[in-house]
Image: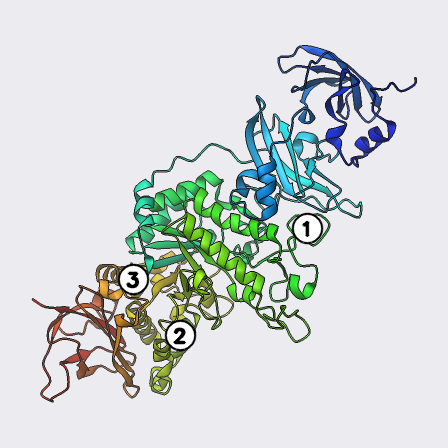
Amino acid sequence: MSKESWQAAESDIKAIVAGRHSDPFGILGLHEVNGAWVARAFIPHAETVSARTLDNRILGELDRRHDAGFFEGKVTATGRMPVRYHARNAGGEWDVLDPYSFGPVLGPMDDYYIGEGSHLRLFDKLGAHVIEFEGVKGTHFAVWAPNAQRVSVVGPFNDWDGRRHPMRVRLSTGIWEVFIPGIGPGELYKYEIVGPDGKLGPLKADPFARQSELRPKNASVVADPTPFEWTDQAWMEARAKKDWRRHPVSIYEVHLGSWRRRADGGFMSYDQLAEQLIPYAADLGYTHIELLPITEHPFDPSWGYQPTGLYAPTARFGDPAGFARFVDAAHRAGLGVILDWVPAHFPTDEFGLARFDGTALYEHLDPRQGYHPDWNTAVYNFGRKEVVSFLVNNALYWLEMFHLDGLRVDAVASMLYLDYSRRPGEWVPNQFGGNHNLEAVEFLRRVNTEAYRLHPGVMMIAEESTSWSGVSAPADKGGLGFGFKWNMGFMNDTLRYMSRNPIHRRYHHGDMTFAALYAYSENFVLPLSHDEVVHGKGSLLSKMGGDDWAQFAGLRAYYGFMWGWPGKKLLFMGQEFAQREEWNEAKGLDWWLLDAPSHEGIRRLICDLNAVYRELPALHARDNEPEGFQWLIGNDHTNSVFAFARYAPDAEPVVVISNMTPVPRENYRVPMPLAGQWVERLNTDAGWYGGTNKGNQGKVVARPSEVEGLGPYADLYLPPMSTLFLKHDPA
């Protein structure tokens, strides 16, 4: 039979059947040809197909032009409309809603802003979204793959057959899209991509997927579009007015998978964690919980730092709504939630971002720029506007959709330096011949600027381990625009000091005082993080020098020193009760230790330190201003004693005194800011904490000096291995 003028060309049919047609929307679906309407469909396994309206009115019978399942025929349509195909074979009959009878969902304004790299709602446009389109419910899929010859959505709904749902490409942006009617929440899917070389690549998870399968499976999941009903309006309104530099910030760093496990050893759900973790952290007096990355990742021992689903809360603990309930519950309890965010690199799992469309798309092609030797990961190409948009939108997504109170940005130093962990010849200099990654600098400035502009009251925190200047300075003043920076130097120096036998500490006094020289160069968070209690480093308790008594006393004194020192506070889980073993992500914390008075004493101390820190403005209101700190005794290396004062406007000063040896000091003279009575607000040697219960009976008196020109002083008893907090009491 000769081909009629309205029929598709054999070459087009073969290309459709092979899944290699460059424009499937130009062939499939409903088309007007020479004044007649023609319907074409590719339905494998069908023997007969009729075209129908959505209300099942028959439009016409289609002829099978190819045994693989290509059908076409004239229909009685009067214009473009959604079409339902009724298919039959020997095994039964079924209906197929035609995705190729629908127009594009994205529009020219999307193309403009995406092309410009300024779109700040990409997470509403790309990925999988359940919508009603042209009167039909289904899911819109959109993905960036500019170098692909063909992109298809595959899943159980089409037997993972990439020939069934090839997408339409928007040439100006390289974004592929298709609306598939009848697909709803919970459907699994991936993208099948034919690269520029014509080769079929591995199936890819959706970079914008809001939900993913539980590992070891890795398909993306069409997320439930039901808006979450937040109950935290009061929290969000109050947060928007806060300048966290002048408020107490005490952070409990948590790995959700190993904080506590179920009785059977499995993971707790987001809801179970909300029921147990949140009241626990609130009772300890923390202001925030910081979560190690909960973005989807395939490998548990990566702790989330090798994410493959940057927009999806990990399925280990439940669905996205479960995570939203966790954050909502935290806010109701007066706790902020900070997420550890990983924009510096990504793993090379074949289903992930690596060579996404058959080319180095998200990463640099040159391994000197696109490969990270420390972590065997790929490095984002910050010079590509689409990649920057992907990451900026991701940060905004977590802040907006999950009401997160901040992001701790991981591995900032690895982004800033082109030669980070690389030998000569293994890196590419910038345009000026230097080692600064200028494109990464601009990315960080942009993400911080947009986060603070759109979400007042959040905190952007940098884990930056070098002396890069202006990490927490405003972006418009030449800084990176972070709100805070982790003070890695304080952590390393002071822990090195505390690890020494107390008798030797006099020779290393500067390890405790050096941080004062740069304390106000940035807005600092003082971290005692997960990195310090893994990989053979032991727990914080085990780091303390001396015998078991000295370790507990030293840890108490050290915590007191840190909570008194200028800077916001962060402590990793388990260290609040002196976990003896180093952290193991494969099991829960050793909660049974709390039955021992010495461990329970440490927990009580953290409670009281957080309470005093929050209650006394002198300990937090000028954390980032030199006017808030004064050395009283900084050079008594012989006795290993430190004393300093903390100040705040319209508040009584606080004096912090630490004795870092097991030798008590009687009648130890300390210069005081003011004469009069000083109340002993906290003593880490108190029996309540497991100490010797020695002190100053709750108060001391500062007397005017008999020597002209010298200020007031007080003679104190300094308990062994202890820290005291004294607050001036004008009454």
Front residue (pair 38, 228): 38
Mark 1 and mark 2: Cα distance apart in space: 41 Å
Percent coordinates x, y for residue 205 in the rendering: 63, 44
Determine which of the numbered discs, if any, sits on residue 606 in the image: 3
Q: Is residue 213 above or below residue 337?
A: above
Q: Is residue 617 above or below residue 102?
A: below
Front residue (pair 297, 164): 164
Percent coordinates x, y for residue 592 in the rendering: 36, 57
Say what secondary structure mark 1 lies in: loop
Mark 3 and mark 1: Cα distance apart in space: 45 Å
Q: Residues within 10 Å of mark 1 (few under 14, many from 20)?
A: some
Tell me the kind of residue under disc 1.
Answer: Glu
Query: Residue placed at 39% from the left, 45% from the top?
Result: 327
Colour scheme: rainbow
Mark 3 and mark 2: Cα distance apart in space: 18 Å
Instruction: Tell me which label, 3 or 2, sits earlier in the chain.
Output: 2
Tell me the kind of residue under disc 2.
Answer: Leu
Front residue (pair 537, 629): 629
Residue 497 lies left or right of residue 59; in this view the side is: left
Determine which of the numbered discs, if any, sits on residue 350 in the image: 1
**Residue depth check, mark 1 versus mark 2: number of the one nearer the observer:** 1
Percent coordinates x, y for residue 344 in the rendering: 56, 59
Q: Is residue 30 above or below residue 532?
A: above
